[in-house]
Amino acid sequence: MIELYHVSKEYGRFRHALTEVTCKVERGEFVFLTGPSGAGKTTLLKLLFREEAPTSGQIVVNGRNIWVLPGSQVPYFRRTIGVVFQDFRLIGRKTVFENIAFVQSVLGLPRAEQRRRAYQVLKRVGLHHQMNAYPQDLSGGEQQRVAIARAIVNEPALLLADEPTGNLDPVLSEEIMRLFGDINVRGTTVVVATHDLEMIRRMGKRVLTLERGRLREGAPPAPLIREAPFLPRG
Amino acid sequence: MAINARYLFGEAWSIARSGARQTILAVALIALGLYVPGLLVLLSGNLGRLATMGGEPPSVVATLEASADAQAVAARLAADPRVERVRVVTSPEALDRFRRSYPDLGAALAELKEAPFPPTVEVYVKPASSADSPKVAEEARRLPGVESADSEEGFDRRFQEAVRVLRGAGFFLGGLLTVAAILSVASAIRLALDLHRDEIEIMRLMGATEGAVRAPFWLYGAFEGLTGGALALGLLFATYAGVSRFLFLHPHPVLSIFWARFLDWRISSAMPAAGMAAGFLGSVLSLGRKAKVSV
């Protein structure tokens, strides 16, 4: 599903966000991506989504080298991926329903079908009563759940989530992870970037750790966890 | 991939609402940009009709007394070696010609018992002798039965020239103001783009094609222009109707005759179309530079 070959990303001459990252995620896998702040987790997700370009290396997603993909094909590629952004990236002037149904609305899916799908997916994140609310009227946690609902509404082949439970309480975080687990069981490949090592342990899934832009298999060692200043809640 | 019309119109409306003041300003500028040249075209159109109501302009027009023998006067004038041809215009012919040129006013003259126009003899001087038109007029004045005779050539040429200048000024000013209107639409779109920059980025990340991102802005620009054009046409018609009403209440010997017809349907329909084209062009120009994909 995802293959990275010697992928590096530099911002300017001296800031190396990722260095020689090589890894493979199989179709249908559930993978946690962890590491301290600034390790390159968000950058890696951005590369997978083609939001940013690697400085060197090759990235293959779903059998396609995404950096040789023509620009006109990028939107169609992105529609096969669901993304939960760290900063939610909801459109403030659109309602929750409109945010979730955006791509379907561009594609001309009947309004009733859009509403049905949006309602179903909002019910799964416990926000079906907020269909007509605007993002700014919701709490941070609710906005995050709307972002999750938007990412999964089209049943994507790949789900990328950047700190999807960052603003949620432990109970809700557990709920969202269960939701991701359900989506994964249905065949969607899931990559979750998170600081929450406790949750990673509980889920018992494959873990990739980024440290100063370098990737290695497995959970981070205990000292790294202890030293991390942002250490996870719970 | 076709873009859903509901999405397209919904987004365009949302863009218009988000920058209401800029939208109103751009519409007003387009309306002004089309109203001013429209007014000049309306003026020149009516003046031009007045200038050409008799077809090819005669060099000299001799107005006859009611009892005069028009054919005899015409024969005398035609005998002059400088004259190419003459034409007798009887009172009923003059009235008929007026009705053809001013169908809207012709009905008002139908109730008159006597023909309001005196018989005339139109004299066409040979091109080589055109400078002698005043002399021909002077000699015509001495003929029995001739009430007055005037050389029309200089006046007619100057009049036609004035109409041409007015029309040219209309088109020039129209061109200038249309460019201003295009720039104002482009500026409104740029502002709308800045207001929507974040969400355009999100839309792209969600899988919106360039067409889906740009098309609402194109539509917004085109509608802005269409509204401006329609507004200009409406204002122009209001001006025409207002002046017509004023002239009906306060008749003027010259203005009442020439201010008789609104723009024909081709020019009328061209105004909203021109506004729409200007709006669309403005949005295309603006988006061409501003909405590039960053990756």
Image (cartoon, coloured by chain):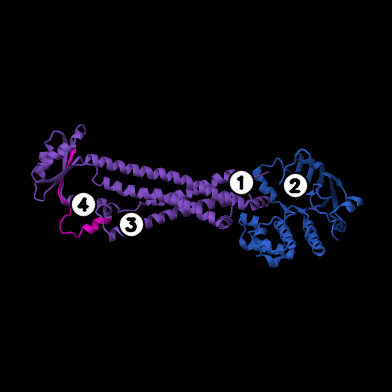
Q: For the residue labelled by badge 2, is the local secondary structure a helix, a strand or a loop?
A: helix
Indicate yes or no whether the magenta region holds residue B199: no
The CA distance from mark 3 to mark 1 is 47 Å
Circle 2 residue: A48
Asked if badges 4 and 3 are on one and the same chain, I answer: yes
Tell me which residue sits at (70%, 40%) in the image.
A68
Which of the chains bears the disc numbered 4? B
Which one is in front in this view, the residue at disc 1 or the one at disc 2?
A: 1
**What's drawn in magenta, residue-wise?**
B104-124
Q: Colour of chain A?
A: blue
Tell me which residue sits at (34%, 53%) in the image.
B262
Q: Residues within 10 Å of mark 4 (few under 14, many from 20)?
A: some
- Asked if residue B280 shows in the view, the reply is no
Which chain is purple in the rendering? B
Q: For the residue labelled by badge 3, is the local secondary structure a helix, a strand or a loop?
A: helix
Q: Give residue B96's mark.
A: 4
Q: Give residue B291's mark.
A: 1
The CA distance from mark 4 to mark 2 is 83 Å
The CA distance from mark 1 to mark 2 is 23 Å
Circle 3 residue: B243
